[in-house]
Image: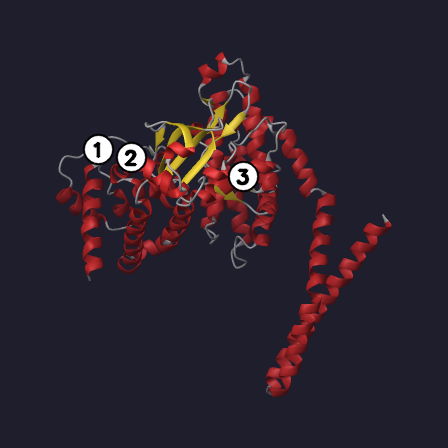
Amino acid sequence: MLDAFGNTMRLIGIARSMARHDALWPLQRLGVARPALFLGRLLGGKRRRDGRPGEKLARALEELGPGAIKLGQALAVRSDLVGEQVAQDLTRLQDQLPPFPFATARKAVEEELGQTLEELFAEFSETPVAAASIAQVHRAITHDGREVAIKILRPDIEARFDTDLKLLYWIARLAERAAPATRRLKPLAVVREFEKWVRVEMDLRLEAASASELAENFPPGNPENFRVPRVHWDLTGRRVLATEWIDGVRIDDLDAIERMGLDRRDVTARSARVFFLQVFRDGFFHADMHPGNMFLLPSGELVPVDFGIMGRVDMETRRYLADMLSGFLQRHYAKVADVHFRAGYVPADQDREAFTQALRAIGEPLQGLTLNRISLGKLLAQLFQTTEQFAMQTRPELLLLQKTLLVAEGVGRKLDPEVNMWVLAQPLIEDWMFANRGPEARIRQTLGDALDTMERLPRILRKAEDVLNHLGDASPREMARERRKSFRNSMLVASCVIAAAALLAAVLLD
């Protein structure tokens, strides 16, 4: 009862702030227009009415503080829930808050690392260089001359987010019970996804591990001249992260790039290749690659920062993306439909012909366009909106990838409006497609699947033996059913073994 009262009072406070910014429209969109309008008149007072709905919501979330800002950033990759324009507006959320005091920063570092600030550092800036909703960053120099960026979590941020999460879960459950129209949006699933995202950002050791993994994928001397700042593990803990200090310019600072004498088209090409390699070669990509998180050094090195939000795509998903994109570009819409049905993304009971026609409606407007006029980010956005109509389950990792694609394309257009980043990366894309989706690659994949089946064969046979031993206690009808099932499984295993043997023989005899 007390929790419900406390949540209700906090909800009223949130509604008051949203009403001030004329941002109660989400309630109207959920089909509760009259209560929303009444609440707006009751709480609104003097309201700011300018801007699009997404801009109004972003301003309200900024006013509500860290938890609301992070929720807005999470919704920015869920265009399936809020719409493309609102999602785009939420990407502009200013993740900036007033810094916490230097004394608090000192205490956090000393408690986490077990030494005084003077013992740890020869210099430590009292004024932070950046202050965001989760943490703030200070510049420091160690006694052995290392220049480092020290990221420190905000005090009590975990407790504040726990409180926010409890409220969000309460609202989600209440919405699903009181407003059936909200169930299609899966509010509880959205909150769980948000919680998973935030929990990772609350442990800076996980961010350090992400930076380390990305650095391993791009060793020194890589052709893209891409370097990840080194993590200083001796100065890193759950609430404190130390990385190499980067003294460069933002990738969208065109004047500074000109002054450094760097070729913007070369920067665009390398950025495109880096992104492509992260997604398709490694399946691990920086998912918060806005211009403030990518720097250029006078040497031409591309250096990313802030590894709190990373994305992963497994090989099966990468193959799906490759087949889907190639199908669209070849106008082979039946192939694109087959990719979705074969992967199980679209349920088998959906109308394949209707789905193929819907894909044609997406793909035909692309025909006649040169590759430099095609936005892969927008293509994916349209695809996800269409597949939702055919009961395709939401896949957060693909939505995160799609949003990251849009940001990357936006940066590329600013660097060089005359060329598309994917045109510059085309040779790399073609090489990957041939290596991973060409005839030899498909044979290797089939062979690998067959070998995997052979490895599982002893377990399958043991299970069949257990079933046969159990038949002695079964009724005649159950025995007949189990025999039929066992026969089907045996035939499947035998077929796989024969196929694997044939492939092995072909490879050995080649």
User: Dot 1: what SS?
Assistant: loop
Q: Residues within 10 Å of mark 1 (few under 14, many from 20)?
A: few
Residue 107 horizontal/vertical position (percent):
32, 39
State the quadrant of the N terminus.
bottom left
Residue 307 horizontal/vertical position (percent):
46, 37
Give the residue number, with chain letter if any, for mark 3: 212
Which quarter of the picture shows residue 141? top left
Residue 67 horizontal/vertical position (percent):
31, 44
Which quarter of the picture shows residue 97? top left
Residue occupying the point 28% across, 36% down: 62
Residue occupying the point 53% across, 30% down: 374
Mark closer to the observer (3, 1): 3
Give the residue number, with chain letter if any, for mark 2: 103
Q: Are marks 1 and 2 in contact (CB under 8 Å)?
A: no
- Mark 3 vs mark 1, CA separation in Å: 45 Å
Earlier-in-chain disc, 1 versus 2? 1
Give the residue number, with chain letter if any, for mark 1: 49
Q: How is the image coloured?
A: secondary structure
In this view, the residue in front, 316 or 358, is: 316
Mark closer to the observer (1, 2): 2
Asked if residue 367 shows in the view, the reply is: no
192 over 133 or under it: above or below: below
Residue occupying the point 79% across, 59% down: 501
Q: Are marks 2 and 3 in contact (CB under 8 Å)?
A: no
Residue 194 horizontal/vertical position (percent):
38, 48
- Mark 2 vs mark 3, CA separation in Å: 30 Å
Q: Classify residue 185 as left or right of residue 428.
A: left
Amino acid on which disc 3 is placed: Ser
Amino acid on which disc 2 is placed: Ala
254 over 143 or under it: above or below: above
In this view, the residue in front, 11 or 6, is: 6
- Mark 1 vs mark 2, CA separation in Å: 40 Å
